[in-house]
Image (tube, helix red, strand yellow):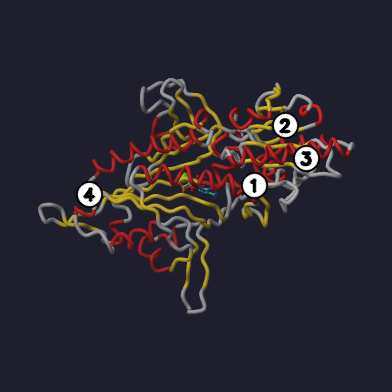
Amino acid sequence: MRLSTLFTKTLKEAPKDELSVNARLLMQAGFIDKLTAGVYTFLPLGLRVLKKIENIIREEMNKVGGQEILMPALTPKSIWETTGRWAAFDALFRLAGTDNKEYALGATHEEVVVPLAQKYVFSYKDLPLYIYQIQDKFRNEKRAKSGILRGREFIMKDLYSFHTDEADLDEYYKAMQKVYFKIFERCGLLDKTYLTFASGGSFSKYSHEFQTITPAGEDEIYICESCQIAVNKEIVGDLENKCPNCGNKNLKADKAIEVGNIFKLITKFSDPFGFSYVDEGGNKKPVIMGCFGLGLSRVLGTVAEVRHDDRGLVWPKEIAPFTVHLVTINSPDIEANNKIKLASEKIYRELQTGGIEVLFDDREGETSTGEKFADADLIGCPLRLVVSERTLEQDSVEVKNREEENKELVKISRVTHNI
Ligand code: ATP
Ligand code: MG
């Protein structure tokens, strides 16, 4: 992609009315735009990151047998009445249709997925079953001041699992914990993310959250450093401030943001819908359920919170909008400038042919070298390549890692191999 044709521009300064670090950085760098509190547009650069996170999640969900679907966001009141959540779910966006019926915008999808699965699951032979989607969710959040960490419209992966018994659910639940850590590893959040014991609601003792340490976090967790797990402050009373694994009472308090949450629903939603199956002995039994949520837009915002410096974003390689930010330094000398342009166009083509994603700062005229470098740091691609009169004297480009200060010259003929 060429910066000269990208319709969005970086901002000289972060938007003043924006308080959260993630939104300030992502808006300044041209990844997102704010429509109103808690509602954002993903711009070309931001959408590339989002799609990469999405594909990582999709890959990992498919590996554990997930079947992807897309459920509607517009849902009738009747299904929410079946579970009692029309009245009980505070943050539900409720709206009226022209047919005298009322609707809700999907805040979560148990009420849609259970009647759906019920149409196909009759016997133990139809189980287990794992269904997921990646979709916009709507919640009328009271406080929407944390940028994309807390949207009123946001993107979630929600997987629902259906089992014959709790032992089968337990096994899948454990496997999913590993899968979640794999996802956080690939998104560059592993070192700061803890499996956290949280309240389980009425059907199971605990649920598990995946909490990433950041001052921007709205939760407080207590970490057991020897077990590398944590307890959410909201349930600490129950656990008497000790590690649920080893009993250690010396826990470290920190602020964190919940990037994922997994629940054993057991029969919480199968009961109200009367969702049952016939077991091997011909007996009717309730279907046992689990649910596994993960916020994609929140993950993106969390990466911005935990991976930046005073110059801008610092993307981990696997979810960076581009691997390489290629910068051309123009020369006032026409002949020299033509050489620079030719060489950088060639490098741009070769990198792309080599399967390397490149953001090419081919801007001329008004844009100064300082501005180009500042933009490269702000946007935060892992590698910056510079082509100038000086580098071409040695048939080279200058290569710099976003996270390091040192630069090295690499021969043009070797560039594609070295990246
Ligand atoms: P929180 O406690 O932060 O309000 P939650 O417990 O209500 O979140 P869940 O219902 O467990 O959230 O949703 C699953 C996942 O969806 C969360 O772990 C989080 O990653 C994401 N998520 C939830 N609410 C939002 C939101 N308003 N904006 C962005 N992501 C969200
Ligand atoms: Mg939660």
Spatial CA span between label 4 and label 2: 52 Å
Asked if the residue under mark 1 is in contact with the one under mark 4, i.e. CB atoms within 8 Å, the reply is no
Q: Which residue is denoted by mark 4 in the rendering?
A: 164
**Most foreground residue, 351 or 304:** 351
Q: Secondary structure at mark 4?
A: loop
**Whole-number angstrom distance, CA of label 3 to CA of label 1:** 24 Å
Residue behind mark 3: 341
For image coordinates 67% across by 42% down, the residue present is 359
Furthest-left residue in this view: 281
Going by the numbered disc 2, the residue's amino acid type is Asp
Residue 170 % position (x, y): 28, 39
Name the N-terminal-most of marks 4 and 2.
Answer: 4
Q: Nearer the viewer, mark 4 or mark 1?
A: 1
Q: Which mark is residue 45?
A: 1
Counting residues from the start of the chain, the first of labels 4 and 3 encountered is 4
For the residues labelled 1 and 2, the Cα–Cα distance comes to 20 Å
Mark toward the start of the polypeptide (4 vs 1): 1
Labels 1 and 2: the sequence-earlier one: 1
Q: Residue at x 73, y 38 (%)?
A: 344
- Residue matched to label 2: 310
Mark 4: few, some, or many residues within 10 Å (few <14, many ≥20)? many
Badge 1 element: helix
Viewer-nearest of labels 3 and 2?
3
State whether residue 3 is above or below residue 78: above
